[in-house]
Image (tube, helix red, strand yellow):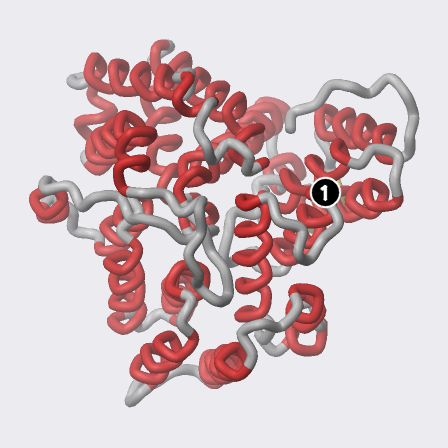
Amino acid sequence: MRLSQAFLFGSDKMKHTTARIYRIRITIAFFMVFLAAPLLIIADTPKASPNLPTTEEIKGEMQTLYQSFHQLFRHSINEKKFLSGEIDGEIQSLLADLENSFHKDELRKSRFSSEPTYRFLLQSIARMVEDANTRFKEGERGYALWQIKSFSQYCISCHTRLKGAEFPNPSFDEQFFSEIKDPLVIADYLLASRQFERAAAAFLSIAKKSEIPYERDRMLAKWLTIKVRVGQNPTVILEELRNYKNGRKLSRRENSELFLWEQGLKRWEKDAQTPIENLLQSGLNKEQQISGGGVIELLRVTATIHRELNEGTTLHAKNEAEKLLLLAQAYRELPGYFMYELPEMLLERAIRLQADTELARKSFLLLREILIGAYSGSGGTYLPDDVKLHLRELEDIAYGIPGQETGRV
């Protein structure tokens, strides 16, 4: 059950607070998508691309952001010290540095700014960091700590979208890791700092050692996403997956799902050039989804479309809005793999790009269905007033009713 349950059972104060948290969580998610947007390229069949970022570009554009993120992440590990007020000055300075970084011309003028996600997230991240900064100044250390801890949880949704140079491995990482007892925190940090191979190995190691099926599911999902969307080698993934299964006592459900992953990887080995529409149709097959299938195809769909959006190609869709709709359909069926707000963000962008068209109306109906589900629970459906207002605005845009020119995306 999602945050919407607080609306069903909580007090008015809780409902207001939860609505605020929901909006901030979306913006945090935008932050991590933005952080990786200029850094990656991917395709089913790896090939050289003029858009492939270099290590020098990553360092030039993201060095300040990364340094601030690293220090804030490090402080978040020691919660007692963070909340004590002893290091308020340093945290305030880091939040200010992070906020200032997103106003730099280098980011707005980046050669990667043609990717749509990059463009419209600049304002979103500025608002998120400003909010965190303001709340911290007001003495709400717990709120700021929660935000900082949330950063790395959303990284997999963006850092694995496209392939590119990894961030240079900082020399201070090993000392940093020695201070951390939780291996998942280390794995998340490795992914947040774009150390893909080490991150994938760390997630797989946690899965191998875990005796809890749910935890194994989560770790394998992160591992698979990195390997499919960044590694791009189905033969290597198959070998690692078989090694993981070998001699390990798994539930029937786990064995069934992993078998379907193997089948998807074998199909990928056999034909790496399957049209995107066919992959999506296969991934969205309800009968296959019920049994846990379609994951490999859907991950490949998201990877290919993100690559096209970044390069400005039109291989599988007539325009950007059509690609965003396809992407949202795929992400909707991968809720355990990525942040759940992604489809909402993509669909709103599609509606605004193609106002008063059949594509905009399809996008709106899907978005409405997603939001109603998000705010529904055993007590019924409760749509906050701001969500109702926003839906009405998008409905008017989709159906050609004039006067709706504002928006968040």
Q: Is residue 79 visible?
A: no
Q: Quadrant of the C terminus?
A: top right
The location of residue 362, given as percent across then percent down, is 83, 47
Q: Residue at x 72, y 53 (%)?
A: 317
Q: Is residue 75 left or right of residue 103?
A: left
Disc 1 target residue: 321
The location of residue 375, given as percent across then percent down, is 68, 42
Q: Residue at x 69, y 54 (%)?
A: 326
Numbered marks: total:
1
The location of residue 48, given as percent across then percent down, is 42, 56
Q: Is residue 14 left or right of residue 198?
A: right
Q: Is residue 79 left or right of residue 363?
A: left
Of 67 and 389, the residue lying toward us: 67
Q: Residue at x 73, y 19 (%)?
A: 406
Q: Is residue 229 visible?
A: yes
The location of residue 222, given as percent across then percent down, is 40, 60
Q: Residue at x 22, y 26 (%)?
A: 82
Of 319 and 258, the residue lying toward us: 319
- For disc 1, the neighbor class at 10 Å (few under 14, some 14 to 19, many from 20) is many
Q: Is residue 176 depicted above or below 102 in this figure?
A: below
Amino acid identity at mark 1 = Ala
Most extreme residue toward the bottom is 247
Q: Which quarter of the picture shows residue 243?
A: bottom left
Q: Which quarter of the picture shows residue 176?
A: top left
Q: Is residue 89 depicted above or below 261 in this figure?
A: above
Instruction: Classify mark 1: helix, strand or loop.
Output: helix
